[in-house]
Amino acid sequence: MKAAKYLLPFVAAALLGACSTVGGMPRGQQTADYKMEAAGGVQAEVGRSAANSSYRYGFGIRLKNAPRVASVKIERTRGGELGVVFDDSRHPTTATKAWQRHADGTRSYLYNNGDGTFDWIGQTAARKLTPQQAPWLYQAGTTHQQYRITIRDLQGRETVLVQDTAIPPEQKQAILQLWRTSSRSR
């Protein structure tokens, strides 16, 4: 059985790094209606080996003026396998209490911030932490990626945000160290 290890410092730094200026991390893109709160952050579930461990990229969008949107589509445009990593246009995200699971393995929900705003939260399908499925983890230096996020509102208007992300070597080492520690303790 896998032990879920949620790397709070890592996840916080990686998820929130998209909107921070600390350490040269890219700032979260925003418009009058939306703000990228998190882009390309990593949530890892660590098992005994890379093949038994998985990760998901996470994304968070502050919906400044509406409790939900018609759809969100996220495409990686640089720094890894290019293409669509999330698209809920066929089954828009409406869940507010738990993950809404999509047929392609992605999941999402709407989070009520309690101040009249909502966050759309989404994660890619799980991938193994192997060199084949997570080459960024085994590459030296900071991994830079870019995502195009297309948000369609309930009136059909589309907003496109282009978000750069960075995963520094220290965060990669944190995952590898947790994996090594986890495999030794079993």
Image: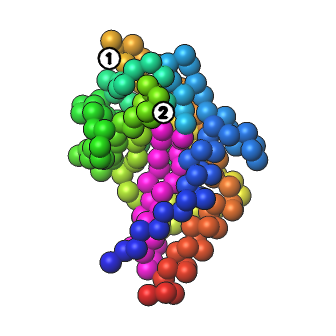
**Residue receiving disc 2:** 61
With respect to residue 81, does 71 lie above or below? above
Is residue 41 inside the magenta stretch? yes
Q: What percent of the width, then of the height, locates residue 146?
A: 58, 38
Q: Residue at x 58, y 52 (%)?
A: 12
Does 46 lie within the magenta span? yes
The dominant secondary structure in magenta is: strand
Q: Tell which of 91 and 147 is nearer to you.
A: 91
Instruction: Give the residue at mark 1.
Output: 154
Q: Cα distance, mark 2 to mark 1?
A: 16 Å
Q: Where is residue 27 in the image (x, y as percent from the top left)?
A: 66, 34
Q: Can residue 45 be seen in this view?
A: yes
Coloration of the structure image: rainbow
Q: Describe residue 133's horizontal placement relative to residue 69 as left or right.
A: right
- Classify mark 2: helix, strand or loop: strand
Q: Give the range drawn in magenta.
A: 38-61
Q: In this view, does 149 lie above or below 158?
A: below
Mark 1: which amino acid? Leu
Q: Quadrant of the C terminus?
A: bottom left
